[in-house]
Image: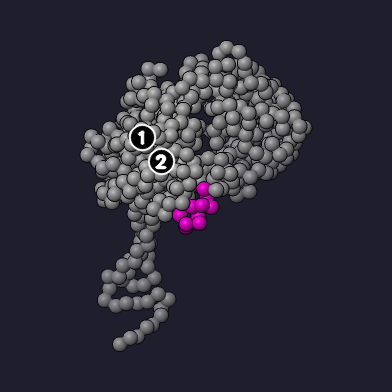
Amino acid sequence: MEFLKDLGLKKIMPGISTGTDWITHKNGNTSTICSPVDGQVIAHVQKAAAEDYDHIIQTAQKAFSLWRSLPAPQRGNIIRIIGDGFRSHKGKLGSLVTYETGKPIQEGLGEVQELIDICDFSAGQSRMLYGMTTVSERPSHRLFEQYHPLGIIGIITAFNFPLAVWGWNAMIGAVCGDVSIWKPSSRTPVSAIAAQKIVAKVLQQNNLPEGIFSLLIGDRDLIGERLLNDRRVPLISFTGSVAAGRHAATTVAARLGRSILELGGNNAIIITEHADLSLAIPAVVFGAVGTAGQRCTTTRRLIIHDSLFATVKKQLVRAYKSIQIGNPLSATSHMGPLIDRNAVQSYLLALAAIENQGGTLVFGGKVLEGAPYDASCCYVQPTLAEVQNHFPIVQEETFAPILYLIRYKGDVNQALALQNQVRQGLSSAIFTTDYRQAEIFLSAAGSDCGIANINIGTSGAEIGGAFGGEKETGGGRESGSDAWKAYMRRQTVTGNYGSSLPLAQGIRFDIS
């Protein structure tokens, strides 16, 4: 693949970087990374050892003392230049993301664009790290708040968005004055290496020290656990499964550290009797099939009013028959492979559970065989299944293109009850042309998710809004709005410019 060479990637590469320098081992452990697209080896990546971790931490600590002292707009300018570096490599990076993850090329390019956009957003945010001023209850006093850099951020990301989620955290954190250590998914480390190489050039060209953006590719038990337990890392941003996130949260909390958790999503779209199906059907298909169902915001449950159920099912079957499944590097492919054979096995187990629990497969449900699918054995059919919301398999998040069709007969409140009757609370949507239904959906008694959309699907969140969810999704917020505050330490300040010392609540304490 020419784009691998153009990005400076080789067959054997170190997976440890201080941001400017790479650490290599002659006899270190390596991980073989294969593409789910065709089963071919992309690279052999050398994994970090214990001594590498300590070196990276110490380097990051030194960098923080310098980086935090730069005025925030100067930090923002560096992030702007990094964004330009990603912009100039967009096509090649997008192709790499597609080849390593299996997502369609349009989505691979879209992810790189999101990385570029968050750099632009962060550059602007660097001039808007606002505090708050209020009134003091004491005369001749001023009361205000300010924010300071926090320190080292540990960023642990998942395979499905190997660049964007890192960018949400690292770039926002950087303009806040923090440095970061990135542990990417062991399934998709090559994209991380490519991004790190682009960042390194910018740091070197601007005479910045090593340690501002560090990379540690290694085993969960060795590297991941060290990050979670390290008191020198005040904040961990973790993206992954609920089970892994629960472990991360309790580990970090045990040392009274902070965590930003982005975990599972069991996202629903409600189609009311007043829905415009010309909007709803395309949104449902993209939400359920995009990234082969391997997004945290994937549409997994479709809650349909009884009056439209048959019509919606018929239109979805017709749409699913038109989906082109194949090499995601081809612009004609709507859906590529699952990430690996373990994901295929999870898909098959979910299908068996659907039927065992009383559900009916409406469309799909097969692993694709024959040329060209045999090369990776990771291609599957997108699947529609008619189910009940209470089925145990429906209550779980299966990271695969399986969409559950659920019928409701009452008013919108009954649909909302079904939507909210899962443990996850990331993204939600309603399709309706009825104003009252939309407002009920957005009310305090409506959707209990962190994201609530009207007449658009569950995926495709904009970077300007805070991204995250409630319940078992973890409660974290990343990217836009005021999410930047999570990467800083908040300080309340009271200043006395008078000639006396009035104490709070009128207390008198005479020591004369």
The dot on residue 206 is: none
Residue 377 falls left or right of residue 498: right
Please name the residue that numbered disc 2 is placed on: 49
Q: Alpha-carbon neighbours of circle 1 within 10 Å: few (<14), some, or many (≥20)?
A: some
Q: Are marks 2 and 1 in contact (CB under 8 Å)?
A: yes
Q: Say which amino acid is labelled 2.
A: Ala
Range drawn in magenta: 248-257
Residue 163 occupies quadrant:
top left
Is residue 229 depicted above or below 219 in this figure?
Answer: below
Q: On the rendered structure, is 357 left or right of 12?
A: right
Quarter of the picture holding the N terminus:
top left
What is the image's colouring? one colour
Tell which residue pokes out farthest to the bottom in this image: 512
Does residue 168 sit above or below 87 in this rendering?
Answer: below
Please rate how many residues cluster around mark 2, counting C-alpha atoms within 10 Å: few if below 14, some from 14 to 19, many from 20.
some
Residue named by callout 1: 25
Q: Position of residue 314 (x, y in %)?
A: 69, 21
- Closer to the N terminus: mark 2 or mark 1? 1
Asked if the stretch drawn in magenta spans residue 341, the answer is no
Residue 68 or 297: which is nearer the viewer? 68
| Residue 398 position in % (x across, y down) | 62, 34
Location of residue 209 (image quadrant) = top left
Q: Is residue 417 above or below residue 401?
A: below
Report how far apart the C-alphas of labels 2 and 1 lie in the structure: 9 Å
Residue 93, given in percent of the width and then of the height, sits at 39, 25
User: Tag 1's secondary structure?
Assistant: loop
**Vertical position of residue 467 compared to residue 339: above or below:** below
